[in-house]
Image (cartoon, grey):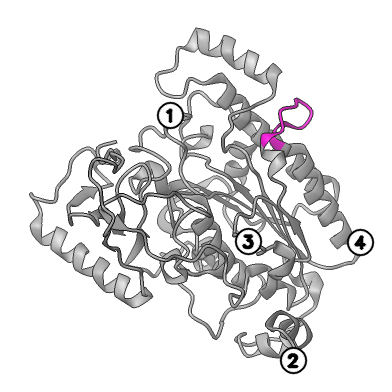
């Protein structure tokens, strides 16, 4: 009997054909767009200068923003990496996948609530973006950080090329800081090979930077030290972190130059981060807190689309987007407009092409884990965002248009709005089958770690 993966590889064209609305499954491949996604690990919303950093210099990301469309209100589906990456790979919310924490996650045996028996590996049954695109003629690669657990390797999940090498994350050499040069060259080699084969490509250049340990090239670090001595920045003041951001930006520059050199300037380029910046290593000002929290600093991230001939150069949108939209959008870009399975993402192409508003009322988060704060769920609907802490049901309400820093809790002043958003959040959790937390029989208050809910 054939395994599911082998079945898809041998008979997948027929399977996927039923999922595509209209058109020839294997249309002329030269008309299919090439797609490059640059995914950065732990990059904060204001870690790039085009999103407000006055300390870090990112000319290449800024250039991408000048030539493309930037989202001011884009979000990761989770405040940590593995769930957000799973949402990009599958188009499904982490709560639906039950993959809700970084893999393998923290251990908190004595907290008030028990962590659910959550999914610690990307389920084999899921059809990844690599698999879906491969079935319509694409060469596909996921190069660098994967972090989907166990033996769930990119090449076992529908990608032609990929691999995770954690030693690169700790690489302390100026010639290849945190493996940025290695991964960039691997991506270029893959694109070059695809071009030789006359096949369209989807490549995710998934950097380990700017995750800890903090290390950037020494020359750049020394330059930033002198710069910060003069500037005396109030928020982002670590020269080693600034150098790490600069190394990331250099990779973006190298990729853009490479695409131009290879006459592939029509490639769609997407720039994104898997969650907010790690508070204490960087600062997400004006956003509150950072990675591991459902405050804006933990989930709001940069998102830039450069789609030559389609997106208008240098424009910014305030439409709300989230990480699982990328799956649906990239498939739509490639000509797959309909699938026969449940997806949580929205197709952003009408916005990218015509500036049409995104057809969605709200976006949601569910993080039943202890991290920087206590377990929580959240909803953003229009300008309003509600956070519910799962231990005691405490609710916080913010108007993000007026209070992007989430300083003024409106829950008691606006009980009707609080009730409206809370009821929407409860309905959504039921709809996606979000895992509930239960009282912990081993709860020991004196051993429970204190969590700061007022970050």
Marks 4/1: CA distance?
46 Å
Identify whether 196 is placed above or below 134. above
Q: Earlier in the sequence, mark 4 or mark 2?
A: 2
* Residue 251 seen in the figure: no
Magenta stretch: give its range: 170-178
Q: Is residue 175 magenta?
A: yes
Left or right? Give the position of 164 relative to 312: right
Tag 4 secondary structure: helix
Res. 248 in view: yes
Kindly indicate whether the residue at mark 2 contacts the one at mark 4 (C-beta within 8 angstroms): no
Given residues 263 and 137, the one toward you in this image is 137
The residue identified by callout 2 is 1
Give the alpha-carbon distance from disc 2 to disc 1, as whole Å: 53 Å
Q: Which mark is residue 150?
A: 3
In the rendered image, which residue does mark 4 sit on? 196
Alpha carbon of mark 4 to alpha carbon of mark 3: how far? 34 Å
Q: Quadrant of residue 419?
A: bottom left
**Rendered location of residue 210, percent (x, y):** 58, 37
Please tell me which residue is depicted at 58% across the width and 42% down the height of the picture: 66
**Quadrant location of the N terminus?**
bottom right
The residue lying furthest to the right in this view is 196
Q: Position of residue 108 (x, y in %)?
A: 37, 49
Q: Residue at x 26, y 73 (%)?
A: 427
Residue annotated with mark 1: 280
Provide the secondary structure element on which disc 2 rests. loop
């Amino acid at each position: 009997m054939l395994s599911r993966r082998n079945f898809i590889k041998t008979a997948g064209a027929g399977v996927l054909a039923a999922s595509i609305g209209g058109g020839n499954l294997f249309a002329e491949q030269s008309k299919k767009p090439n797609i490059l996604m640059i995914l950065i690990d732990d990059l904060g919303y204001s870690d790039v200068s085009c999103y407000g950093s006055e300390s870090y210099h990112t000319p290449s990301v800024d250039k991408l923003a000048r030539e493309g469309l930037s989202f001011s209100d884009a979000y990761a589906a989770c405040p940590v990496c593995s769930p957000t990456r799973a949402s990009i790979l599958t188009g499904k919310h982490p709560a639906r996948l039950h993959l809700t924490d970084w893999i393998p996650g923290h251990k908190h045996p004595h907290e008030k609530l028990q962590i659910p028996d959550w999914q610690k590996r990307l389920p084999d049954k899921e059809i990844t973006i690599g698999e879906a695109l491969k079935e319509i003629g694409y060469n596909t690669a996921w190069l660098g950080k994967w972090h989907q657990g166990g033996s769930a390797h990119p090449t076992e999940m529908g990608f032609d090329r990929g691999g995770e090498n954690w030693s690169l994350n700790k690489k302390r050499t100026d010639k290849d800081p945190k493996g940025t040069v290695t991964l960039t060259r691997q991506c270029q080699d893959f694109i070059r090979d695809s071009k030789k084969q006359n096949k369209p490509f989807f490549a995710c250049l998934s950097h380990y930077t700017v995750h800890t340990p903090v290390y950037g090239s020494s020359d750049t670090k020394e330059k930033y030290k002198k710069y910060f001595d003069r500037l005396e920045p109030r928020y982002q003041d670590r020269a080693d972190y600034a150098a790490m951001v600069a190394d990331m930006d250099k990779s973006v520059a190298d990729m853009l130059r490479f695409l131009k050199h290879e006459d592939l300037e029509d490639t769609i380029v997407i720039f994104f981060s898997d969650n907010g910046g790690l508070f204490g290593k960087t600062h997400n000002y004006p956003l509150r807190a950072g990675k591991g929290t459902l405050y804006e600093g933990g989930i709001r991230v940069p998102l830039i689309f450069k789609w030559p001939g389609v997106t208008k150069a240098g424009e910014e949108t305030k439409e709300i987007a989230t990480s699982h939209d990328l799956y649906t959008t990239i498939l739509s870009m490639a000509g797959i407009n309909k699938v026969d399975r449940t997806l949580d993402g929205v197709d952003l192409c009408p916005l990218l092409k015509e500036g049409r508003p995104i057809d969605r009322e709200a976006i949601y988060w569910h993080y039943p884990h202890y991290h920087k704060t206590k377990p929580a769920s959240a909803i953003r609907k229009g300008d309003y965002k509600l956070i519910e802490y799962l231990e005691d049901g405490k609710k916080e309400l913010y108007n993000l248009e007026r209070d992007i820093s989430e300083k003024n809790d409106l829950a008691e002043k606006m009980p009707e709005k609080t009730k409206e958003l809370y009821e929407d959040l409860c309905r959504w959790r039921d709809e996606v089958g979000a895992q509930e937390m239960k009282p912990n029989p081993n709860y020991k208050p004196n051993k429970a770690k204190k969590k700061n809910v007022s970050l």
